[in-house]
Amino acid sequence: MSRIVVTGGAGRLGRSLVAGLAARGHEVVSFDRLPSEAPELVAVEQVAIDLMDAAATASALSDARADAVVHLAAIAVPFSAPEDVIMRTNTGLAVSVLGGAVTAGIRKVVAASSPTVLGYGAPTGWVPDRFPLDEDTPPLPWNAYALSKLIIEQSLRMLQRQTGDDVRFAAFRPCYVIAPEEWAGAVTQQGHTVRDRLDDPALSAPAVFNYVDARDVAAFTDTLLEALPHIPNAETFFVAADDALAREPLADLVPQFFPGTDEVAAALTGTTSAFSNAKAKRLLGWSPAHHWRAELASADDRQDVPA
Ligand SMILES: NC(=O)c1ccc[n+]([C@@H]2O[C@H](COP(=O)([O-])OP(=O)(O)OC[C@H]3O[C@@H](n4cnc5c(N)ncnc54)[C@H](O)[C@@H]3O)[C@@H](O)[C@H]2O)c1
């Protein structure tokens, strides 16, 4: 059992992560702007704080006496605020939280990055050197959100250069996160349902048809925190489902939305995802347990059960 601070614990991913880590026996403290009444957080210690205030953050992290920090707090959607605000906020939060965690003597420091660092959707075009995309694919951010996430990954490496291996760091890039209630029809981050995303590939194309179940992100994070002392320091991991969020093979769909990718996308046959989760499987022994076909089928079964 560890004591874990989750920043942004009241957010979309944060709530599932807090619940998942607590269910695995950890003592979780959520740091967010305001206390939340979400059911996942009722039994959890909450600290209301503006994490942009670096001095207050360092002091609260020190008071928390935590073994680990998982940093999620951010502006989480590209172009949801002016570019300068996203840049200042996400990088400012990283310096405040990640630096504050090291100052507070916390020995495990993990931060959420994003697959968008790879640069898909750039108005000037995007043709990766190969599919599936993995941690060796060169980042080519084209907006402030993606660049801020790359800076978060680099901030962890910067801190590791300062502290050496006494503190263990890692960044993870969760794919499009689907919370459990969203399989049953609640709207996802972009304001439509999972079924809408499957029925209209144009909705899922901006994420190159990636997704991951929030419970799998919680299991991943727990596994990562446990493994941190035993794996190379300051690594980055994709956290992706095994399959693509699409009804057709991506070899057909990807070239429709990303001109010029016909040749490289030919590898994406069957249900193959554009994003590889092989590194997390290899280094951590983690595998996603939730897949959209089974989740939607069981959501349908539940609706068929008479009340
Ligand atoms: N949801 C996804 O599909 C997805 C995919 C890739 C990466 N991510 C990353 O995962 C993290 C969580 O995403 P999410 O979807 O849960 O976002 P979210 O917007 O639902 O939650 C972010 C939380 O951070 C908090 N926060 C922001 N600024 C703060 C501040 N100054 N002080 C205190 N709290 C502050 C917000 O109040 C909010 O509760 C983000 O870093 C995001 O970039 C999410």
Image (cartoon, rainbow, N blue to C red):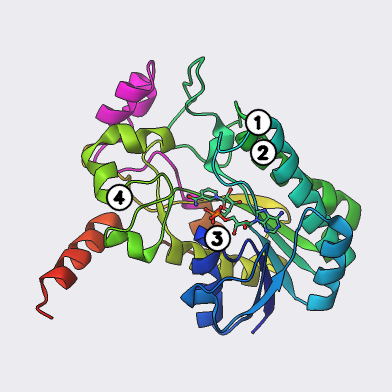
Q: Which residue is mark 1?
A: 83
Q: Earlier in the sequence, mark 3 or mark 4?
A: 3
Can you tell which mark lies on residue 11? 3
Mark 3: C-beta under 8 Å from nearest atom of ligand 1: yes
Where residue 280 appears, as percent x and y from the top left, is 53, 56
Q: Which residue is mark 4?
A: 193
Asked whether disc 1 touches disc 2, contact meaning CB atoms under 8 Å apart, the reply is yes
Q: Earlier in the sequence, mark 2 or mark 4?
A: 2
Where residue 34 appears, as percent x and y from the top left, is 65, 66
Quadrant into which the N terminus falls: bottom right
> What residue lies at 27% left-to-right and 62% top-to-bottom?
184
Instruction: Describe residue 11's horizontal placement relative to residue 202 as left or right.
Output: right
Specify the amino acid type for callout 1. Glu
Instruction: Describe residue 141's horizontal placement relative to residue 96 as left or right.
Output: left
Q: Earlier in the sequence, mark 3 or mark 2?
A: 3
> What residue lies at 85% left-to-right and 63% top-to-bottom?
56
Label 1, label 4: how many angstroms apart (C-alpha)?
27 Å
Q: Which residue is mark 2?
A: 86
Asked whether disc 3 touches disc 2, contact meaning CB atoms under 8 Å apart, the reply is no
Specify the amino acid type for callout 3. Gly
